[in-house]
Image (tube, rainbow, N blue to C red):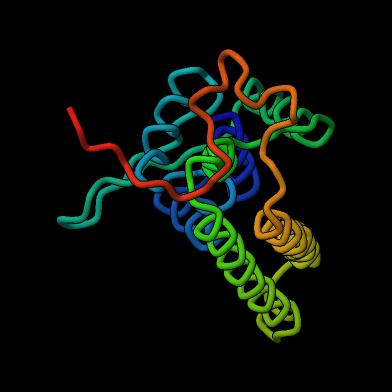
Amino acid sequence: MSATRMMILGLVRWMQPVHGYDVRRELLSWNADRWANVQPGSIYHALRKLTAEGLLREVATEQVGARPARTTYEVTAKGEDEFESLLRGHWWQLHEPPDPFAAAFSFLPALPREEASAALRNRANLLRAGVESMRAALASDWMRNSKPVHVGWMFELWAARAEAEVGWCERIAERIDSGVSYLPDGLVGAEGWNGWSDGETTPRDTTE
């Protein structure tokens, strides 16, 4: 939520006075829902909440014909302070985003080894395709002529992260295929670890 607050405050500050519709359109053009978890349906609610908190002010409300009314916003002095605080907090602190894959990977032994290694190699292929897409975007006229330079630097960051994960996926898939045990010797059969397997496929007991 703090990233959403920062981005909305920053965009209003950048574009003010600005309609909420234009803030939403700009965020969608950035695909912020993918990399900043800014959900399109939450933007108008966030604008109203920031206004209620005194971080934004409503400048005017306009209605043309039968179209929905559009409210124009500006950042208040309190909003400026909040934006600066959030901005520097995200620059100077390390934030680990929730990752559903990490949650699933913690249950690695629940998958048969063959499936686990295949899934990791598939993940590597998907990431590799994404890297190729980002590299193509970086080399395109669209990036060079219509985007600020730092947008390209962000693409480079995403590509570097994805390339690192490609290598990790392939290394772990090889280790799984090699049959390496998932548990240290001292934990095999120990209390609290009885339900863990080594990823081997075994028939389920269907008896009552």
Q: Position of residue 47 (x, y in %)?
A: 44, 34
* Depth check, front residue: 72 or 28: 28
Residue 113 in view: yes
**Residue 59, placed above or below residue 161:** above
**Residue 172, placed above or below residue 109:** below
Outermost residue on the right side: it is 92
* Quadrant in which residue 187 is drawn: top right
Residue 12 in view: no
* Depth check, front residue: 146 or 32: 32
**Residue drawn at (56%, 15%) of the image:** 192
Q: Is residue 84 left or right of residue 47?
A: right
Q: Is residue 107 left or right of residue 136?
A: left
**Residue drawn at (74%, 30%) of the image:** 184
Outermost residue on the top side: it is 191
* Quadrant in which residue 76 is drawn: top right
User: What is the quadrant of the C terminus in the image?
Assistant: top left
**Residue 100, placed above or below residue 132:** above
Q: How many numbered callouts?
A: 0
Q: Is residue 18 left or right of residue 206?
A: right
Q: Position of residue 22 (x, y in %)?
A: 45, 54
* Quadrant in which residue 58 is drawn: top left
Q: Position of residue 45 (x, y in %)?
A: 37, 33
**Residue drawn at (64%, 41%) of the image:** 10
Q: Position of residue 49 (x, y in %)?
A: 43, 25
**Residue drawn at (61%, 66%) of the image:** 121
**Residue 134, placed above or below residue 190:** below
